[in-house]
Image: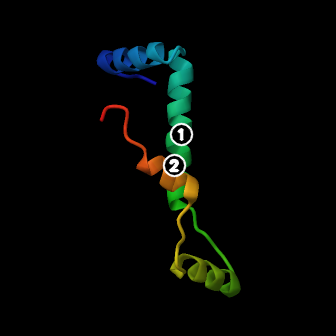
Amino acid sequence: MRLPARDIALIDRAADLGGRSRTDFVREAAVRAAEELLLERALVRMSAEGFGAFVQAIAGTGRPVRELVKVLKRKAPWE
């Protein structure tokens, strides 16, 4: 890949902060971006029965998750 010097400098700086090589950093970023795009565009197919169960699950009344409520009630360290 041919990149402008300032882009390479930025990538190198970030890679150094992460303790990785430029190649590893760019490979990981490219793979992550590719996975995200493919997941965004993925077509989900399900049977009519499966779709009915899905709709029923998301339309139902939620209930609190005790552990999550506890975490969300904690005071932030900077407060």
At x 67%, y 77%, the residue is 46
Question: How did the renderer colour the structure?
Answer: rainbow
Could you say where residue 48 lies in the image, as x and y percent from the top left? 66, 87
At x 32%, y 15%, the residue is 5
Type of amino acid at the residue the image marks with label 2:
Glu
Could you say where residue 50 lies in the image, as x and y percent from the top left? 68, 80
Callout 2: few (<14), some (14-19), or many (20+) C-alpha neighbours within 10 Å? few
Which residue occupies the foreground of this view, 51 or 76? 76
39 above or below 2?
A: below
Q: Tell me whether the residue at label 1 lies in contact with that at label 2, contact meaning CB atoms closer than 8 angstroms.
A: yes
Could you say where residue 1 lies in the image, as x and y percent from the top left? 46, 24
At x 49%, y 42%, the residue is 33
Q: Which mark is drawn over residue 36?
A: 2
Q: Which mark is drawn over residue 44?
A: none
Q: Secondary structure at mark 2?
A: helix
Q: Secondary structure at mark 1?
A: helix
Q: Which mark is drawn over residue 32?
A: 1
Which residue occupies the foreground of this view, 23 or 1? 23
